[in-house]
Amino acid sequence: MFKKIFSLVLVLCISVLIFSGCTQNNSSSSEDSLDKVKKSGTLLVGMHDDYPPMEFRDEKDNTVGFEVDLANEIGKKLGVKVKLVSNAWDGIFLALNAKKFDVIMSTVSITDERKNTMLFSDPIVYGGNAVYVKEGNNELKSEKDFPGKIIGCEAGSTGQNVLSKISGIKDIKKYNSTPDAFLDLKSGRISAVVTDPMVGDYYSQKEKGVYKKLKTTLTKEPIGAAFRKKDKSLRDGFQKAFNELKKDGTLAKLSKKWFGYDIYSS
């Protein structure tokens, strides 16, 4: 009888220890992502810093732009410093999942396909795929005129996906740097560049009389901050900070600074 009681107590003790260990492991594996960032004191922001006016390097090699300023304001709201981590666009999503940074703020279009593997904030701005040609080019009026032409876009962008569905294009030239695409457009090496309207408009304003935007727009896309699928608390903290910045007028100021008007007025 004593042996049976002893065996039962032993089994119960072992069960408690196993359960306790599992609970601790589950707790540590589901660590709150927002708390983790706050404890570290730094929000790591990944971006491909070659996409003016959203994020780019100025003459002094400083990373500047609309999303750079926005990231810093978000950091203030969260009570942490912001560290920008430069990453090539074509590997930026893999780098996020490899925990190279906590969030991507790099003009990321929110698509159904990307939602399968990432969490997104609400739209920060609305971009899409506008078409820019060289001033004086009256041959191209819409995507119907693309057959037989060389069209440029950023490698790995939604613009590349859109262009791949248009038949007859002579070549889709993919660039790692959007400024290089506009330089090739300027020199006549390509017939058009497909890119976000705020980016193309930036170049049109920077070099007046060199580029023009066609009336056609291939797509209109929401752009947001991207997070790892499990980092819901960090996404929610980001969204709360963003909403506060919109309410207190900070976003309006940043918009006027980089775009010349308040995109949030409506």
Image: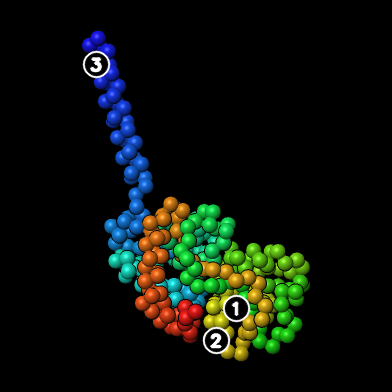
- What's under tag 3, amino acid-wise? Phe
Asked if 200 appears above or below 38 in the picture, the reply is below
* Location of mark 3 (residue): 6
Side of 230 where 108 appears, left or right: right
Colour setting? rainbow
Mark nearer the viewer, 3 or 1: 3
Crowding at label 3, few (<14), some or many (≥20) Cα neighbours within 10 Å? few
Labelled disc at residue 205: 2
- What's under tag 1, amino acid-wise? Phe
Q: Gap between marks 3 and 1, in whole Å?
A: 80 Å
Q: Are marks 1 and 2 in contact (CB under 8 Å)?
A: no
Q: Position of residue 237 (x, y in %)?
A: 37, 62
Q: At x 37% / y 71%, what residue is drawn? A: 244
Crowding at label 1, few (<14), some or many (≥20) Cα neighbours within 10 Å? many
The part of the image, by quadrant, that contains residue 246 is bottom left
Q: Gap between marks 1 and 2, in whole Å?
A: 13 Å
Q: Secondary structure under badge 2?
A: helix
Labelled disc at residue 182: 1
The answer to whether any part of residue 127 appears in the image is yes
Q: Position of residue 152 (x, y in %)?
A: 64, 72
Q: At x 41% / y 55%, what residue is drawn? A: 232
